[in-house]
Amino acid sequence: MVTLGIVLGVIGCASLGAIGFFRIARRLANPMSDLRETRQMTTTEALTPVIELKRGGDDIGDLGNSFREMTVSIQDSLSKMRAASKRLSSCAQKMGDSSKAVSASAQRVKASSQQVKASSQQTAQDSQKRENHLSIYV
């Protein structure tokens, strides 16, 4: 009878130990599975998932919180980079438009300069003709 009690006690302790082991294993495996799924989604879906672990104070909870903070930080950086890219593109467009306007103005200045040159040459020729004409009378 004592042997039967010991055997039943050992079986009971082993059963409780197995149940405890499986509960602990499940508590460890579920958050790790969540982290793995979230990591996979962030690589394929542009960092949209944000992990929410219901536990804290242990290494897995800390890892999940760090992963969430990292994902949010990367999302913020990407958002800022996209905004800066749009501003840069806008500035480049404005510079291109300004460059075209400056080029058009330079063409007008060139044309005006050529007209002034032609007028100056004409005036010089006219002056020379007058001078030659007047020298006949002197």
Image (cartoon, rainbow, N blue to C red):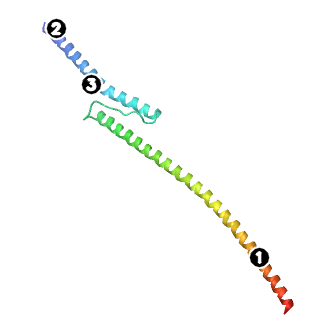
* 47 is higher (above) or lower (below) than 33: below
Q: Relative to residue 39, is residue 14 drawn left or right?
A: left
Residue at the limit of the structure toward the top, as seen here: 1
The percent position of residue 51, horizontal first and vertical second, equals 35, 32
Q: Determine which residue is flagged by label 1.
A: 121
Disc 3 residue type (three-letter)? Ile
Residue 24 badge:
3
Q: Determine which residue is flagged by label 2.
A: 4
Q: Earlier in the sequence, mark 2 or mark 1?
A: 2
Residue 103: which quarter of the image? bottom right
Q: Label 1 to label 3, Cα distance in Å?
A: 101 Å
Residue at the limit of the structure toward the front, as seen here: 137
Q: Secondary structure at mark 2?
A: helix
Q: Relative to residue 83, is residue 10 drawn left or right?
A: left
Q: Label 2 to label 1, Cα distance in Å?
A: 130 Å
Of residue 36 and residue 80, the one placed in the foreground of this image is 80
Disc 1 residue type (three-letter)? Gln
Quadrant that contains the N terminus:
top left
Judged by depth in the image, the label closer to the viewer, 1 or 3, is 1
Q: Relative to residue 59, is residue 124 drawn left or right?
A: right
